[in-house]
Amino acid sequence: MLKYSKQTRLLLAVDCIIFGFDGEVLKILLIKRGFQPEKGNWSLMGGFVQPDESLDQSANRILKQLTGLEGVYLEQLYTFGQPQRDPIERTVSVAYFALVDIHKYEAQISDDYQAEWFQLKRAPKLIFDQQEMVEQARKRIRYKAAMHPILFELLPTKFTIPQLQTLYESVFNTTIDKRNFSKRVLATGLLIKLADKDKAGSKRGAYYYQLNMQNYYAKFQAFMNFIPNPDSL
Amino acid sequence: MLKYSKQTRLLLAVDCIIFGFDGEVLKILLIKRGFQPEKGNWSLMGGFVQPDESLDQSANRILKQLTGLEGVYLEQLYTFGQPQRDPIERTVSVAYFALVDIHKYEAQISDDYQAEWFQLKRAPKLIFDQQEMVEQARKRIRYKAAMHPILFELLPTKFTIPQLQTLYESVFNTTIDKRNFSKRVLATGLLIKLADKDKAGSKRGAYYYQLNMQNYYAKFQAFMNFIPNPDSL
DNA sequence: TAAATTAATTGTCCTTTTTACAATCATAAA
DNA sequence: TTTATGATTGTAAAAAGGACAATTAATTTA
């Protein structure tokens, strides 16, 4: 037996929703699409799955080709397959999302590629069904971040607790009591206090912390509750 | 512009992992594969995505064609795309999982189709990477069921609290204190106590309950915690 | 040099939730 | 009537969560 001869073959694409944090607000990375249709319009990083690569490989390749990003947190999100989602030809797209510390890759991205960070709230309209993809990705990171320590992927190696809190407040579009937040975060045993301070944000300076990688990997699948009232995810 | 002319097209399949509960243990539905390769071996319900149907439609069609099941809880799980997962020809498969009350469809399935229920723990080896699909599906329902009232989809309209507890214990492979379990479940406001009893399980009989559908749909996306120590998902 | 400013850091009390734990009830069978 | 079986219900202690504000460290300003 050689082939499933009577079946129809389809185009398969990968689209990547890349979230980034700069210390202030949550952003997504968009690119000016390089081919027709919709050439020149803002879109997610996308491309077609090649015959010899897995989906994960495809997502990583596309990410690297279009942005230079490598080794970032990347996770399959959902597969979108409405027959008419691409007007040119039926294309099923496997969406991935990535979490990136913006500053870490700042120079690289802006110099070499036509990609640009947009505030998630103020991003331009996207092509095809990509708006829906972004919305699902946003829901997913809220969902995961409410229980798993996933948001650390968006921060630099050294970070302060106020920075961490700003990130959570940004992702969940809420405000959290400072005392309760630091109490909870420290109680996880995920943070190691460092000797030096970040003096950028205040006169007094805030102590840097880094992840306890042992505990981080051990607790990554565990449940925790960083968010006060997670009913509204 | 007519087509993305230079790209390779792939076969796209859908595979369905169907979980069922009979009041005792958690089961999955398998079928004897009807075509080569691996014809006659136990496999998930699968088929190729047709040119004009969405992925959800494809999953529902395949489910109905192979088992007669219709209108059951069906959710996209993950997309599997290792290049060599199908030895005949590269096929990417979008996996779905379904939750079914076994007794409700018992006659239908056994009479009309070559499908059979197996205890999840004692299921035969499956073809290709379907073992991995089942494992992922098992993880997913644990994950979801720990917070969302999804397991009611596995029960008949009328059920007792001991039945519900057996289901949870079966899915999570654990034991739960009876008093605490019923306290929690009743506290959700999801259950309506009925007047009649199920006398099958005991002399005294256990009161039937049914879902309060209002609250059910309202709370389906909400977080709740049915499982004492959900660290081990 | 002192005062003012700014953000970081820390603690307590109260409420709610979770957990551990066992006696009683209803019914059919003996 | 007694017995046996599973269903039902309650309480106290512990843990977690939530509301709430004063103090500290360092720079900037007066």
Image: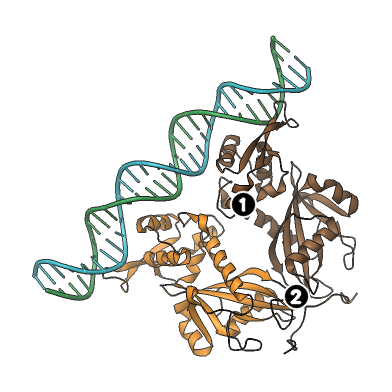
Chain colours: A orange, B brown, C cyan, D green
Location of residue A72 with respect to B151 vertically, above or below: below
Residue A125 in picture, x, y percent from top left: 55, 79
Find residue C13 and report its image quarter: top left
Q: Amino acid at mark 2?
A: Pro
Location of residue A74 with respect to B205 vertically, above or below: below
Q: Nearer the viewer, residue B2 or B5?
A: B2
- Measuring 71% from the left and 40% from the top, which residue is drawn there? B158
Residue A130 falls left or right of residue C6: right
Does residue B44 show up? Answer: no
- In the rendering, which numbered label is found on residue B83? 2
Tell me the distance, in whole angstroms, between the alpha carbons under discs 1 and 2.
40 Å
For the residue labelled by badge 2, is the local secondary structure a helix, a strand or a loop? loop
- In the rendering, which numbered label is found on residue B217? 1
Q: Chain of mark 1?
A: B
For the residue labelled by badge 1, is the local secondary structure a helix, a strand or a loop? helix
Location of residue A62 with respect to A79 vertically, above or below: below
Does residue A184 show up? Answer: yes
Find residue A139 and report its image quarter: bottom right
Residue B54 falls left or right of residue B168: right
